[in-house]
Image (cartoon, rainbow, N blue to C red):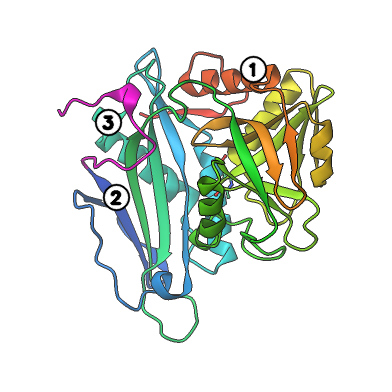
Amino acid sequence: MENINWSELPFGYMKTDYNLRCYYRDGKWGEIEVCSSEYIPVHMAATALHYGQQSFEGLKAFMGQDGKVRLFRSEENAKRMQNSAKGILMAEPTLELFKEMTHKVINLNKRFVPPYGTGASLYIRPLLFGSGPQVGVKPAEEYMLIFFVTPVGPYFKEGFSPVSMLVTREFDRAAPLGTGRYKVGGNYAASLTSMEKAHDGGFANVLYLDAKEKKYIDECGPANFFAIKDNTYVTPKSESILPSITNMSLLALAEDMGMKTERRPVVLEELDSFEEAGACGTAAVISPIKSIYDDDNKKEYTFKSPGEISFKLYERLIAIQNGDDEDKFGWVDIVE
Ligand SMILES: *Cc1c(COP(=O)(O)O)cnc(C)c1O
């Protein structure tokens, strides 16, 4: 096979051998189809294209030192995709279908699972969308579920490297009772302008505030926000943030390490009292935050970076994912 430089892989798309497709037609899911083309035939009136009936997931598979491929909490991704589907009236994939497609797409592309020790992993991208035509605004009658994979590098090539975030009051990514808690593309479309502004200013991403009062912290672009103070793991509770599986896992690990944990509304000014801050999600696990800049008030909040508690949490999580640590929470599935 082509020579892949595993430790230099970006977080990006690379063609692999196979992808899977499954259609929901006449009220039921059909057979899983194996495909080698990267293209899909789509009806020009598909609801995904016009009315945003679309959701996706992202999860990783890791090669262990024992040569076994491990999946991290994939059932949580399946449940979240069901919830996203429910939220925008799409057909829900069953948990069994999601699992079968996840295992099958990994096995068919096994040669793309990066070797143990490179820090790289195989990223699995499930995609669900309304493929049936409508012109009036209503849910499609046909849905397509696609699973593709791409090997991705460690998010931080130089290791655990701290980033800066920009507070925005000029844009919202999701409304308080909108689709923020679903993993749907529309939230990302809504975030692009503010994200580009942040990048232009030299920031890694945007820290969104709650859309209604602009008082509480929501999340950081495509990752949840957490902070550490007084041996407590604090993360915002809000109806408009996406329930991150990484965040849920870090909460459990923090508790296991004897820390207190709090999921509650977090006002922006509380940043002053935090010792460590971070963004968390599947792609990077944890991006430690060194500073958060509030341009409207010309105020900069700074944190210990990298903080040792965040680093400990990061190391424990990746050790479980890679199979180096005992899976005491039952989070890991071996891909057979
Ligand atoms: C996917 C996603 C996250 C991270 O969720 P994980 O399950 O930890 O990968 C956080 N915020 C948003 C908006 C997301 O789409």
Left/right of residue 324 with respect to residue 280 in the rendered view:
left
Q: Residues within 10 Å of mark 1 (few under 14, many from 20)?
A: few
Q: Nearer the viewer, residue 286 or 332?
A: 286
**Residue occupying image coordinates x 64% and y 21%:** 306
* Residue 44, x across and y down, in percent: 30, 76
Dot placed on the residue nearer the N-terminal end, 1 or 3: 3
Q: Amino acid at mark 1?
A: Lys
**The quadrant where residue 251 appears:** top right
Identify the secondary structure beneath mark 3: helix
Q: Amino acid at mark 2?
A: Leu
Left/right of residue 227 with respect to residue 245 in the rendered view:
right
**Residue occupying image coordinates x 79% and y 37%:** 271
Left/right of residue 41 with respect to residue 265 in the rendered view:
left
Query: Does residue 11 show up magenta in the picture?
Result: yes
* Residue 302, x across and y down, in percent: 72, 31
Dot placed on the residue nearer the N-terminal end, 3 or 2: 2
